[in-house]
Image (cartoon, helix red, strand yellow):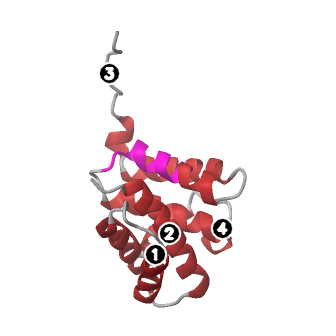
Amino acid sequence: MKNRSKSRQFAVQALYSWLLTQQNVSDIEVHFVSEHDMEDADMDYFHEILHFVTAHKMALVDHMETHLARPFAEVDPVEQAILLIGTYELEERRDVPYRVVINESVESAKIFGAEDGHKFINGILDKVAAKLRTAEVNAPRTRKPRKK
């Protein structure tokens, strides 16, 4: 099975490039894939993230804006990319549990973001999850029995 975590991390980097340059996303994708060893990544997932996020950026931003203390455009581009991916997954990928979405986003922020950027990402996506996945967020947690 190909690694979705790697796909997300590559998508953060490619979206960062897109946010900075506003180049055609297909051109960025071709260049990015040719420059990186993406053998272990789920290429279909990488492509899906990249193209959905760039095509629906403003709709994704709309889900976050009420939770931001400043305009989205003033958020660091690395954090923008991570928030866009996390919001995309919360909205469109119901097969990915919301806790996984938030955890993956926080991990990306720890790798690519500013020192405490992961706290910012966690706080925003937590609120977006409460809005987009109310039933899942409010569902009682079931704990798996510990192995003896």
The foreground one among 147 and 48 is 147
Q: Which residue is mark 3?
A: 144
Which residue lies at the image location 42% right of the left edge and 81% below the top edge?
A: 29
Secondary element at image label 3:
loop
**Disc on the earlier residue, 2 or 3:** 2
Type of the residue with mark 1: Lys
Taking the view exactly as shown, the residue that stands out farthest to the top is 148
Residue 30 on image: x %, y %: 41, 84
**Disc on the earlier residue, 4 or 1:** 1
Q: Residues within 10 Å of mark 1 (few under 14, many from 20)?
A: some
Q: Rounded to the nearest whole Å, what is the CA distance between mark 1 and mark 2?
A: 6 Å
Asked if residue 99 can be seen in this view, the reply is yes
Q: Rounded to the nearest whole Å, what is the CA distance between mark 2 and mark 4?
A: 11 Å
The foreground one among 129 and 97 is 97
**Disc on the earlier residue, 1 or 3:** 1
Mark 3 or 4: in front is: 3
In magenta, the rendered stretch is 96-106
Q: Rounded to the nearest whole Å, what is the CA distance between mark 3 and mark 4?
A: 38 Å
Q: Rounded to the nearest whole Å, what is the CA distance between mark 2 and mark 3?
A: 35 Å
Q: Which residue is mark 1?
A: 57
Which residue lies at the image location 29% right of the left edge and 69% below the top edge?
A: 44
Residue 47 on image: x %, y %: 35, 73
Type of the residue with mark 4: Val
Type of the residue with mark 3: Lys
Q: Rounded to the nearest whole Å, what is the CA distance between mark 1 and mark 3?
A: 37 Å
Secondary element at image label 1:
helix
Q: Quadrant of residue 48?
A: bottom left
Q: Which residue is mark 2?
A: 61
Mark 1 or 3: in front is: 3
Residue 43 shows which numbered tag? none
